[in-house]
Image (spheres, coloured by chain):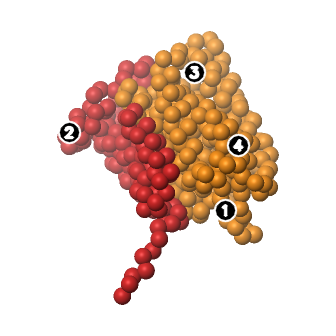
Chain colours: A orange, B red
Amino acid sequence: MTILLFTAILFLGALMAGLLGSLTGLGGGVVLIPLLTLLFKVDIHYAIGTSLISVIATSSGAAAAYVKEGITNIRLGMFLELATTAGAIAGAFLSTYLPTSFIAILFGIILILSAIMSFMKLKDPDDTGSPGLLSRVLKLNGSYPTPAGKLSYTVRNVVGGFLMMNVAGIISGLLGIGSGALKVIAMDNVMRIPFKVSTTTSNFMIGVTAAASVGIYLKRGYIDPGLSMPVVLGVLLGAFIGSKILTTTSTARLKILFAVVVFFLALEMIYNGYTHKI
Amino acid sequence: MPLLKKKIQDADLELVIGQLLRYGVLLSSVIVAAGGIVYLFRHGGESPMYHQFKGEPSKMKEIGPLWQAVWRGEGRPLIQLGLLVLLATPIARIALSVVGYLLEKDYLYVTITVVVLAVILWNL
């Protein structure tokens, strides 16, 4: 295979990953790493570095749109970035010392969790109870636009959410994914924030979290331009197309299909890690 | 005539942040695509080697040698430069927020964003 063909196939793969990731809300990184390691036999550290780069691209692109609509809680995002960036840096350090087979197995487990997570019915906690002291001092309580007008919400359990975000950051730096699922759990289930606010705020933070660990991968030589070029461009284009057709297609069936694919990719990652093929 | 000095609000900050993110991603993808064309034109016929980790040469990791290689017209360093622009985008977003919160006189959030910025820059 020549570099030209390799680049073309990788570009198409990344395009599909970006498209499906944005349509299903799972993110592109979850399929990119199995694609690179299982299909293209790329070393897992290269794959993680490449995936992190694409995570910055898609999250920044999408965040630009959400921030403008005023749904994202920027103060909450900034505050929780304290937790995620510190975690991401720790995760990136760990990643270069842990055996690749262990990373592959952990990746598979997180992948299965994310696939299951995408099916959980997330109900908005209609919660206007009295906010805690921390969320008042930090000015985290906010409001967001809905079809029925502006809706106010309060933020609970700031400490618990902060700790959960720290874990999300470690996973992100270690495995090269945005770990959006974990971030949404932290904000949704722990901090009791409306679903729309938690997804967009999580997305807002993912770029910064990834940037924190990319620096470390870059210094150690895990960011390769030949791999990153088709992946970044492919994922960006895919995510862009996805955001355009999102309103016109029903995503329920697509989501099931995608989750099944992710599930089998996860099993294969775990198997390959277990038999030390990765 | 006393000009009504507009108070800087969160909404203004949101608008500027949105613009910054959009243009940062756009600029970086243009640079990456340009570098990609040069790279494929020169090396498209060779074989890819990614099975084993070798690490990148210093011209891909340090800004000085990278910059020189870009000016020599090399494709891979130009792609890498585009990736650096992408990496700089969310970092610039934090730096911008520091300024925004300073103008809002929200010193608690000035501190929070400065710490996040310092943690990231310290590890670059």
Label 2 crowding class (10 Å Cα cut-off): few <14, some 14-19, many 20+?
few
Nearer-the-camera pick, A62 or A166? A166
Of the two numbered discs 3 and 4 on the same chain, state the one appearing first in sequence.
3
Q: In this rendering, does residue A239 appear at all?
A: no
Q: Disc 2 vs disc 4: Cβ atoms closer than 8 Å?
A: no
The residue at 53%/40% (across/down) is: A82
Name the amino acid type tagged 1.
Tyr
Give the residue at mark 3: A103
The picture quadrant where one finds residue B76 is top left
The location of residue A254, given as percent across then percent down, is: 72, 46
Q: Nearer the viewer, mark 2 or mark 4?
A: 4
User: SS for tag 2?
Assistant: helix
How far apart are the alpha carbons under marks 2 and 4?
51 Å
Do callouts 1 and 4 point to residues on the same chain? yes
**Disc 2 residue type (three-letter):** Gln
Residue denoted by label 2: B68
Quadrant for residue B59, please give it: top left
Foreground of the two, B87 or B115: B115
